[in-house]
Amino acid sequence: MDDSLERYSRQVRFPGMSEEGQRRLMRSRVTLCGCGALGTVLANALVRAGVGHLRLVDRDFIETSNLQRQILFDEKDVADNLPKAEAAARKLRLINSTVTVEPVVTDIDRTNILALVDGADLILDGTDNFEVRYLINDAAVQLGKPWVYGGCVGSHGQTPCLRCVFEAAPAPGETGTCETAGVLGPIVNIIASFQATEALKLLAGRADQINRELLYFDVWENVQRRIKVAPLLGKVDCPCCQRRRFEWLEGQHGSQTTSLCGRNAVQVSHRTPARLDFEQMSRELGQLGTVSFNRFLLRFQTEGYEFTVFPDGRAIIKGTADEDKARTLYAKYVGH
Ligand SMILES: [Zn+2]
């Protein structure tokens, strides 16, 4: 074993990986979308395992409430006010200086996703954000690249398509967010570790080993489920992989933001209207700030921002003129 492989000796000795798999892994390029909870676990696993090049994309800065589960960050990163991608890259280079880590601080949207995944052998979803997930799915199907999302995997040739399984993204407010529903650190590690293992199989040239089922875990309630999705793939009349209509890439779905001039406010709206349940939202948000609502709108104040949310999912966020910040706040409190 030559010197460059020595640090990976335990992994190379693992028969599924072997020297050939390791060499492939070291030549491979990955784009990781999102560097929060799932993203930091994924990045840590891949860089330690010796991926060749890792492009890390994230729009956020680190906050103290991230430290409970985002394993690459510490209190100094919060004090230094570093973007997540940059702080993660610094730490990852200390862990393995032979890997090229490329941080990109940006909001992933339909205008930049194709450039961000350009040259990647694999795309990893670390965002836990439905909009980005469907965008990645469109890009991956269009370009014929494999991608792995939380607990579920596809690779081209097997029809790598999220829309075959879940045709539409849940509406904003329909699923809880980490802010409203909370999240335990260990489940993040479990899900991301499954994702990282699938990534290693694909990059080491062992696509024959990939998991074709949807895995579901609830570590608190002690529930584990395997859902067979392989029979669905390619059998449904899927707009994305069958009809090759890339609706998220083309902007027919998803959100848009508009800075409201002179008002220190940003409007976030959705192309596909939602039907928000204000009663439920006010119960969840009531723990995090001041809420009031009537039939027409819900008002919520927290962190010095004021949200005015309409039943179709549109929101005006007062207290910032920065569209990226508004998107982050919307994802945090209203939903993805
Ligand atoms: Zn499909």
Image: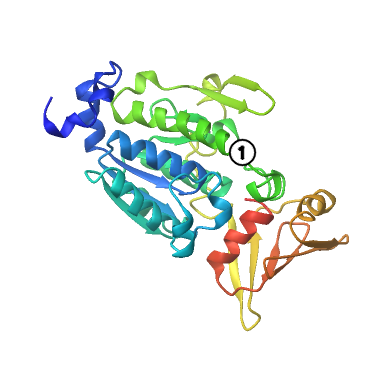
Which residue appears farthest toward the front when viewing the image?
75
271 over 237 or under it: above or below: below
Q: Is residue 126 visible?
A: yes
In what quadrant of the picture does the N terminus appear? top left
**Element on which disc 1 rests:** loop
Residue at numbered disc 1? 184
> Which residue is the extreme one toward the left?
2
Colour scheme of the rendered structure: rainbow
Report the residue that reaches farthest toward the bottom: 262
- Give the residue drawn at x 49%, y 60%: 78
Query: From the viewer's perspective, is 90 left or right of 246?
Result: left
Q: Residue at x 55, y 51 (%)?
A: 66
- Give the total number of marks visible in the rendering: 1
Q: Is residue 238 visible?
A: no
- At a point 85% along the width and 61% down the height, the residue shown is 293
The spot of residue 313 in percent (x, y) is 72, 57
The answer to which of 162 and 58 lies nearer the viewer is 58
Residue 330: image x %, image y %?
64, 59
Near mark 1 (Cα within 10 A), the count class, few <14, some 14-19 or many ≥20, is few
- The image shows residue 179 at horizontal and vertical percentages of 66, 50
Residue type of the residue flagged with mark 1 = Leu
Using the image as rendered, state which of residue 200 and residue 136 is in the foreground.
200
238, 117: nearer the viewer: 117
* Residue lying furthest right: 294
Q: Is residue 254 above or below residue 245?
A: below
Q: How far across and how far down the image is residue 55, in percent?
A: 34, 49
Asked if the beta carbon under badge 1 is closer than 8 A to the nearest atom of ligand 1, the reply is no
Taking the image as shown, residue 259 lies to the left or right of residue 316, namely left
| 222 sits left or right of 104 in the view | right
